[in-house]
Amino acid sequence: MATSSVSKGCFVFKPNFKKRKISVPIEDYFNKGRNESEDSKLRFETYQLIWQQMKSETEQLQEELNKNLFDNLIEFLQKSHSGFQKKSRDLGCQVKLREIPTAALILDMKHFLQKLFSQLMDCCVDVKSKEEKSVQVTQKKTHCSMDSLCSWYMTVTQKTDPKMPSKKRTTTSQWQSPPVVLILKDMESFTTKVLQDFIIISSQHLHEFPLILIFGIATSPIIIHRLLSHAVSSLLCIELFQSLSCKEHLTTVLDKLLLTTQFPFKISEKVLQVLTNIFLYHDFSIQNFIKGLQLSLLEHFYSQPLSVLCCNLPEAKRRINFLSDNQCENIRRLPSFRRYVEKQASEKQVALLTNERFLKEETQSLLENLHVYHTNYFLVLRCLHKFTSSLPKYPLGRQIRELYCICLEKNIWDSEEYASALQLLRMLAKDELTTILQNCFNIFKSSSEKHLGSTAKRIEEFLAQFQSLDDAKEEEDASGSQPKGLQKTDLYHLQKSLLEMKELRRTSKKQTKFEVLREKVVNFIDYLVREYLLPPETQPVHEVVYFSAAHALREHLNAAPRIALHTALNNPYYYLQNEALKSEEGCIPNIAPDICIAYKLHLECSRLINLVDWSEAFATVVTAAEKMDANSAVSEEMNEII
């Protein structure tokens, strides 16, 4: 390419990119970190094992969530256009002649819709990239009109292909007049006029070209009526199919991956807040949330040498026996272990700090206690959620993840929200209380662990006592304590008697049997919370399984270019390393680059600033340097004269 005259244009040279193969194995990067240790390879293998288990759990969960939706959609396709099936005219599923059966999927899963498209239409799915997927159908060029489509349909439905596999022949025999399924995977992106014209034309040929539309909707079903006029939408026989909401899906994922002892890895309250805030306030993407969880897992095994013990309990005990002297010192440096040592007797303190064998035995015991702690923790957490999830105004949150965040952060019983929840629990009716107790009993009974076996027995006793309450006797006791004036029929004396009875109950403070039993239940739940919902920081060696570096996670997940630009404009010294650009917090150096001065002025009052004030403020800062130079020049001249 000739580039003799630069003034004639702009020349672009496209480099010949080639995929570079990574010559260094991924596990070797664990040896290059700031916490290099002899167990780096084992840590990487443990990370891979745990992640594969968590990944397979999420895939199974996604399959279960989609199964019901997929089955309902297939049933809808089978029932639609039953008028075209000779043997199914009496099923009561007839649609109007010009109504197009339409399924509206309220979700955003393009990959799933493409798979469905491929299975129903026998098309080739070509996935080009993660962001953009296209479905390519190879067909001969024909005259594009509804008449040609109708002719093609008649030819295909009446044609018998001897090469067709037996499985497909069986499927075709079930559909004597199979409909044509058209999937619009992203309805919001379609041109309104084109879509309306297609629906109107298709409705005119519905008797000879049976059509079923499937709309993929990422927002709300109201979008159908916004994009289509009433005249067009009336031509559609719409049925909605909706998957779990984003928040419910997130709760299900947390329940499977974090609120369980199946996986030893856990995250702190701040890390969980970072991941959930990105989910709730940015993208609503479960896939991105799981990727963030994977990044947390990888960062934990990379930065924490003792993460080699973050595995199932028997394997962790075995690995403790082979810990090196350096790893033993790492255990002694843990803040939680140091607090644990300070609470022990002096002889045991010396043994823990000097005897390697005794230290390993004690670490095995502490890890076993940590496993028991998590088992009890999640059982009591679920039980408490059953009690508080239906309370008015949800003082402890409606979702279990909200309750989990509170319990991770601090002693929940010290919060005002917990005190408010207990007050509301003391006003529950008998039916509500027995229903919640039965759910809690099922939670403890379904657990294979025996650590809280007495708790299940205690709840069963409460249920039996509620069952044995004699309501008739309670009413008789209550009526016997009423004053005689209540028998009078006039309104004045009746109101007076009711007030006297209310005052008598208030002063005597006599509780019914149900109220006494209800108070015992609330006190028992409060005991379980204080006993088993201690924050993880109270447990020795919890750092082995808990990832708490929220700042590192935030640096990876936040938009890096935006942070870099903000740093460069707000603090130019960070990149230029010019001593003259150093300034105190909140000050604007007048020798900084113009764009940095303008940016910092904009940050001061970005919502209220206007162009005139912005320009005047900029001129004031810049001219301050000139005035300082002029003053310094005058002072120099005066000194020379003197």
Image (cartoon, grey):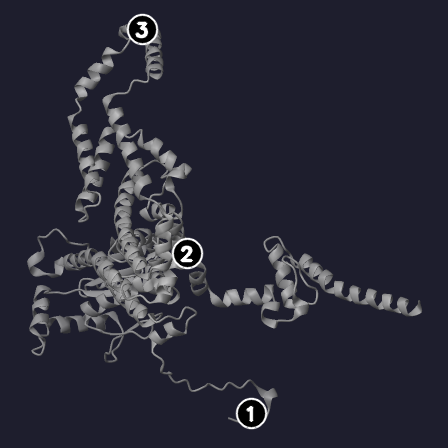
Across and down, in percent, residue 586 comes to 64, 57
Q: Residue at x 33, y 51 (%)?
A: 247
- Mark 2 or 3: in front is 2
Q: Which mark is residue 274?
A: 2
Relative depth, front residue between 218 and 415:
415
Q: Are marks 2 and 3 in contact (CB under 8 Å)?
A: no
Q: How far apart are the two marked residues, 1 and 3, measured between alpha carbons?
A: 109 Å
Are there few (<14), some (14-19), or many (20+) residues within 10 Å of tag 2? some
Residue 42 lies, with reference to residue 409, above or below; the image says below
Q: Classify mark 1: residues with Cα within 10 Å, few (<14), some (14-19) or many (20+).
A: few
Q: Amino acid at mark 3?
A: Asp
Give neighbour class at mark 3: few <14, some 14-19, many 20+ (Cα, 10 Å). Answer: few
- Image coordinates for residue 459, horizontal then vertical, percent: 20, 36
The answer to whether the residues at label 1 and label 2 have Cβ atoms under 8 Å apart is: no
**Gap in angstroms between the C-alphas marked 1 and 2:** 51 Å
> In which quadrant is the C terminus drawn?
bottom right
**Disc 3: which residue:** 490
Q: Is residue 142 above or below residue 300?
A: below
SS at mark 1?
Answer: loop
Q: Quadrant of residue 85?
A: bottom left
Instruction: From the top left corner, tell me how far across and down residue 525 is, in percent.
Output: 28, 36
Number of marks drawn: 3
Quarter of the view holding residue 219: bottom left
Q: Which element type, helix, strand or loop, lies under badge 2? A: helix
Looking at the image, is mark 1 or mark 2 earlier in the sequence? 1
Q: Residue at left 14%, top 65%?
A: 178
- Residue with the mark numbered 1: 3
Name the disc covering residue 111, or none: none
